[in-house]
């Protein structure tokens, strides 16, 4: 791999249906790498598995178009790259003492409460390589929309947050750093940084799949970004699934496990 840093082109809108939908449209129309879009409000925000994403004014909704070279199997790693980038951005503003942690595959939590969701869309070339990626972020900045299935948090719980535009550029800066590190040095440094902000190895968790739920203990990430779960039947590796984790198990970064 080779590093391929480009200047970001940031477009800011008052209202959009979905920032990721706009990025997908631009990608399919041939937009070059580095396009980013922010909406102050989304009318049709979406999360994983088609879930609606509540998008009140005051939070950061941003999607970024990338065109990295790579095999199809590498597309899933970009969710982890994106997670490390947003965790580093949050640490810059909240301070290292803030208990921000990453939960596989695409969440950032504040003291166990969901604060960030990440959604990665991708398309392949006819030869089976990555054509484009769209990384979509929803960051609770001023508002923590209530959810029935989990607690939520926002940056305003701890600080008087900066302007949305300022946060957008801060996040783009971190994404550029981690994008280049991944393209230059491979997945190993991303994996280490992600694990440093995750729950400790051995933390009890369950992985929910459409066909069943697996219970076990967190075993880290494999070299392909898969979640390793130590079960009573041995270690299983998951490339997809919903992780269910007791909020009390999520540590501050200082107590996380790194490799």
Image (spheres, rainbow, N blue to C red):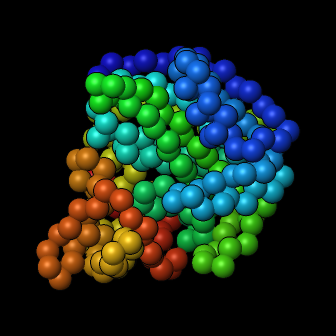
Q: Residue at x 38, y 31 (%)?
A: 124
Image coordinates for residue 34, horizontal then vertical, percent: 57, 22
Give me the residue at 33% from left, 18% from top. 2
39 and 122: which is toward the camera: 122
Image position of 246 with respect to 5: above or below? below
In the visual, does 178 lie left or right of 125?
A: right
Left or right placement of residue 24 versus residue 75 in this view: right
Residue 142 is at least partly visible in this image: no
Q: Nearer the viewer, residue 199 or 122?
A: 122
Residue 115 vertical placement versus 12 (above, below): below
Furthest residue in direction left, as rendered: 234
Instruction: Name the image quarter holding residue 172.
Output: top right
Horizontal side of residue 114 vs 69, given as left or right = right
Residue 52 image offset from top left, x and y in percent: 66, 60
Quarter containing the N terminus = top left
Tell me the residue at 33%/78% (across/down): 212
Q: Nearer the viewer, residue 100 or 36?
A: 36
Task: Compare residues 113 and 212 and report the one nearer the observer.
Answer: 212
Q: Position of residue 84 (x, y in %)?
A: 47, 46
**Quarter assignment of residue 244:** bottom left
Q: Is residue 182 above or below residue 196?
A: above
How many numbered callouts?
0
Tell me if I can see residue 153 in this picture.
yes
Q: Is residue 235 left or right of residue 92?
A: left
Point out residue 198 in the picture as x, y percentages from the top left corner: 41, 61
């Amino acid at each position: 791999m080779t590093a391929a840093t480009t200047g970001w082109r940031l477009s800011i809108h008052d209202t959009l249906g979905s920032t990721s939908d706009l990025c997908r449209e631009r990608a399919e129309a041939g937009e070059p790498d580095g396009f980013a879009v922010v909406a102050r409000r989304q009318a049709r925000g979406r999360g994983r598995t088609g879930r609606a994403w509540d998008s009140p004014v005051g939070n950061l909704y941003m999607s970024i178009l990338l065109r990295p070279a790579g095999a199809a199997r590498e597309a899933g790693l970009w969710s982890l790259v994106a997670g490390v980038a947003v965790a580093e951005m949050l640490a810059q503003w909240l301070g290292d003492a803030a208990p921000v942690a990453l939960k596989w595959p695409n969440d950032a939590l504040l003291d166990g409460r969901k604060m960030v969701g990440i959604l990665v869309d991708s398309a392949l070339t006819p030869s089976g390589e990555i054509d484009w990626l769209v990384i979509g972020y929803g960051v609770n900045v001023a508002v923590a929309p209530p959810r029935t299935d989990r607690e939520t948090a926002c940056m305003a719980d701890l600080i008087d947050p900066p302007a949305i535009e300022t946060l957008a550029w801060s996040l783009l800066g971190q994404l550029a750093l981690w994008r280049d590190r991944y393209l230059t040095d491979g997945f190993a440094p991303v994996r280490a940084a992600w694990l440093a902000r995750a729950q400790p190895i051995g933390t009890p968790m369950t992985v929910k799949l459409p066909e069943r739920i697996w219970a076990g203990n967190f075993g880290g990430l494999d070299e392909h970004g898969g979640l390793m779960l130590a079960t009573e039947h041995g270690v299983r590796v998951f490339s997809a699934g919903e992780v269910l984790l007791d909020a009390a198990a999520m540590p501050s970064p200082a107590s996380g496990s790194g490799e």
